[in-house]
Amino acid sequence: MSLVFVIFHSVLSAIGCVLNSMLCHVAAWKSPTVIKTYSIITVNFAITNLTICGVNFILQMRMVPIEKTMIFVSYGPCQWLTDRTCFNLYSVLVHVYTHTIWLLLISFCYRYYVMIRSEPSKRQVELLLLIIYLPSFIQMILLFFDFTDPLILLDIQQNLVPQYNFTDLMIFGVADSTSFNAMYSIVHVAVMSTPIVLCIVVLRKKILRKMEFKGVQVNANTRSLQLQLLRALTFQAVIPGFYLIGVASYFVSRLEIYRDPFFEYLIFSAFLFVPVLTPISSFIFVTPYRKWFLKTCHWRNYRVESENYDTKEDTHETRGHTVSVR
């Protein structure tokens, strides 16, 4: 199973690095004026997800929750580094995962906000992104100070789950996950993801209702881009489900509901889908990004079909009712 795990994480991490690097470039330099402010969030998304994929490639962790203890086994290149380095990289990885969850919520909040008020300035968006980053940053700093000697972790493992053999493997973790530092991270990742997903579902419904509003005319291209972004966000609304799968796997192991390596491998494997699927949604649903992607990849036939579809879509939107988008 470990070989399949390594191949899976290596391939998905590499794909995620490529896609998020491309998205960062196109969002920063190729975004149309109408979504230029929103592209700041997209760039932040891409950088965060690129960090996740890069660090995950180095770590490739299996998480083994044992009562109050959390042990991580690295199967990636990190096994040739020091255990302290691996633990610090783990702290970085978890903090960007939580930041991604908040970014997804902010994406929906932004789309709803510009439908009822004027578009915020770039400075306001940047300030908001800084504020929502602070809880994740604090989480990372706190985790840095929760390092446990691997010998202590091995002793706990041999006493509580002797069927496992972690000898000669790179392990690191936290001996007491009930400490404030560790509990802050657990609550931030495992508990906050559920209400955030619920908020996203509510916001999506509110946005759809606003887009059904009739009677106000707006530029067809503007509304077309708004609709494309909405489809991307709708697709992204499904993505947090992978967080819930990882969180559920964590509690299955942590609460000793069923002890099996499959669930321990699944925790971070499920999380990894998030930074890979997020840029894919932008390249599929946001036309300027899709055209750039197809052109860059030299997929001419698909590009022509895409352009024809967009022309028909814009024509249809021009004929129909429009929505107030500010």
Image: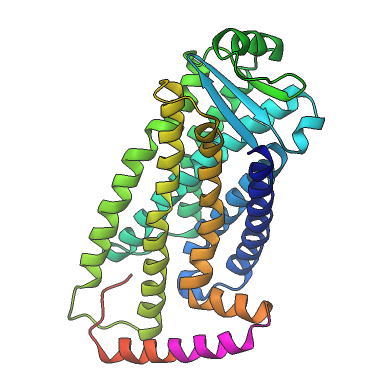
Residue sitting at 55 percent across and 30 percent down? Answer: 261
Task: List x then y, in percent, for residue 115.
Answer: 29, 65
Task: List x then y, in percent, for residue 181.
Answer: 52, 19
Which residue is farthest right? 80
In what quadrant of the picture does the C terminus appear? bottom left
Residue sitting at 35 percent across and 78 percent down? Answer: 223
Using residue 267 as the reference point, say whether residue 148 is left or right of it. Answer: right
In what quadrant of the picture does the N terminus appear? top right
Residue sitting at 52 percent across and 58 percent down? Answer: 277
Q: Which residues are magenta?
A: 298-310
Q: Is residue 308 magenta?
A: yes
Residue sitting at 51 percent across and 36 percent down? Answer: 267
Q: Is residue 52 visible?
A: yes
Q: Main secondary structure of the magenta part?
A: helix
Task: List x then y, in percent, for residue 234.
Answer: 36, 62
In the image, residue 72 above or below residue 20: above
Q: Is residue 177 magenta?
A: no
Residue sitting nearer the eye, 238 or 159: 159
Q: Is residue 133 visible?
A: no
Task: List x then y, in percent, for residue 248.
Answer: 40, 35
